[in-house]
Image (cartoon, rainbow, N blue to C red):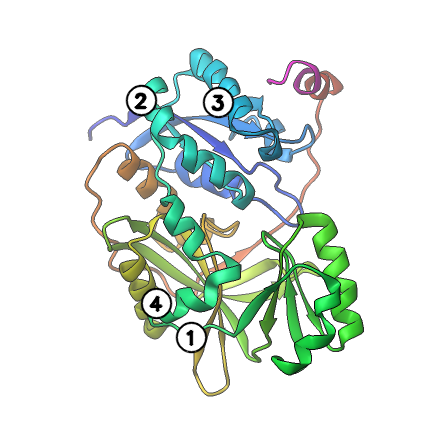
């Protein structure tokens, strides 16, 4: 048996809370890689992100500036981290940070030797919630009608284009179903206060929610895809348990979307399956979902495939996955020394 190649990978999204980031599942997947012996560098935005203190998964952690701080400060911080750690690949896992990393990707490679495997800026913008309807038309998939609004004053006129209930969505996260214009106004203010403008108004489609975690090679090939139905949902709409599905139609739609868009990197496709068996694409998230570890449990290690492609390896598409595998999320109390918290708070590394 050949020995595994030792590599260092930086991963963000360490907030494994009730609305978890994908970072910890991505790290777990990489730690189980058949090809690599992976040393993990955690990148954090908050000092209480639980992943910072998971010493069995994260080998070293550094704080990085919030996306609102701008690209220059992020680049300066990454330069310091690279001098200390010698990172081969970075996997960013938050929607809000992807714009910065996509823009910096060429410089990270040329100046620091750090590889990424991210969609282009054009691809990233094309699947945005605000233009998802047009994205659906271009890629041959049904999408509920939607529009952007920038003021609560626009809500009364929505009855001319939508029927209630309708969905009010933030530009990055959060979605609430409004039964009246008063509720829509309330959700508008609540979500815009957290995520800013615009707010997306979307036609409500009734049915069962089914999601797909997938990865594209940027050349039109879907390297892997595993569909899942949520079995338990939190009050924030997050899956706390789910099961892998035998749904070839969903796999075909995913292949078509990734093929037509030539998507590069990991993604999550969120669908509603109506009583008539029609599929409507609700969102295409431009990174791995927090439940991506289910794909690993089903025989498709998507984070490992992403790292291999980032390093220039030829990766063949997965042909099968296990059906009827469940993930059941849990929480537990970590015991952490105050000195660790003080160190990441003051020095920015742990």
Asked if residue 269 lies left or right of residue 238, the reply is left
The residue range painted magenta reads 343-350
Mark 1 to mark 2 CA distance (whole Å) = 40 Å
Please identify, in this view, whether the residue under mark 1 or under mark 4 is nearer the observer. Answer: 4
Q: Nearer the viewer, residue 175 or 342?
A: 175
Considering only vertical position in the picture, is 12 above or below 237?
A: above
Check if residue 58 falls in the magenta segment.
Answer: no
Q: Quadrant of residue 67?
A: top right
Q: Which residue is mark 2?
A: 110
Q: Secondary structure at mark 1?
A: loop
Q: Which residue is mark 1?
A: 142
Q: Which residue is mark 3?
A: 75
Q: Position of residue 103 (x, y in %)?
A: 42, 35
Disc 1 + disc 3, Cβ < 8 Å: no
Q: Could one spot residue 259 in this view of the protein? A: yes
Q: Quadrant of the C terminus?
A: top right
Residue drawn at x 31%, y 58% is 261
The numbered mark at residue 138 is 4
Q: Position of residue 342 (x, y in %)?
A: 73, 17
Q: Nearer the viewer, residue 77 or 271?
A: 77
């Amino acid at each position: 048996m050949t020995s595994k190649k030792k590599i260092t990978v930086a991963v963000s999204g360490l907030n494994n809370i009730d609305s978890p980031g994908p970072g910890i599942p991505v790290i777990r997947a990489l730690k189980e890689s058949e090809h690599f012996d992976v040393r993990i560098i955690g990148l954090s935005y908050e000092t209480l992100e639980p992943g910072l203190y998971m010493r069995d998964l994260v080998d070293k952690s550094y704080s990085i500036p919030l996306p609102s701080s701008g690209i220059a400060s992020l680049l300066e911080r990454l330069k310091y981290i690279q001098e200390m750690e010698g990172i081969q690949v970075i996997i960013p896992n938050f929607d809000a940070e992807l714009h910065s990393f996509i823009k910096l990707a060429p410089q990270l490679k040329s100046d620091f030797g750090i590889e990424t495997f991210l969609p282009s800026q054009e691809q990233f913008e094309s699947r945005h919630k605000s233009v998802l309807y047009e994205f659906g038309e271009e890629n041959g998939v049904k999408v509920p009608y939607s529009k952007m609004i920038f003021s609560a004053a626009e809500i009364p006129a929505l009855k001319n284009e939508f029927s209630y209930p309708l969905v009010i969505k933030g530009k990055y996260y959060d979605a609430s179903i409004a039964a009246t214009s008063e509720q829509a106004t309330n959700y508008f203010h609540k979500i815009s206060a957290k995520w800013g403008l615009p707010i997306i108004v979307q036609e409500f489609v009734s049915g069962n929610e089914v999601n797909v975690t997938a990865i594209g090679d940027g050349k039109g090939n879907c390297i892997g895809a595993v569909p899942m139905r949520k079995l338990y949902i939190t009050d924030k709409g997050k899956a706390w348990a789910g099961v892998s599905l035998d749904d070839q139609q969903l796999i075909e739609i995913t292949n078509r979307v990734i093929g037509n868009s030539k998507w590069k990197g990991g993604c999550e496709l969120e669908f509603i399956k109506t009583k008539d068996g029609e599929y409507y694409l609700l969102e295409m998230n431009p990174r791995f979902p927090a439940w991506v570890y289910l794909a690993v449990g089903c025989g498709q290690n998507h984070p490992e495939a992403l790292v291999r492609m980032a390093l220039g390896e030829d990766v063949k598409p997965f042909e099968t996955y296990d059906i009827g595998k469940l993930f059941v999320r849990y929480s537990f109390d970590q015991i952490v020394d105050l000195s660790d918290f003080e160190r990441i708070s003051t020095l920015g590394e742990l």
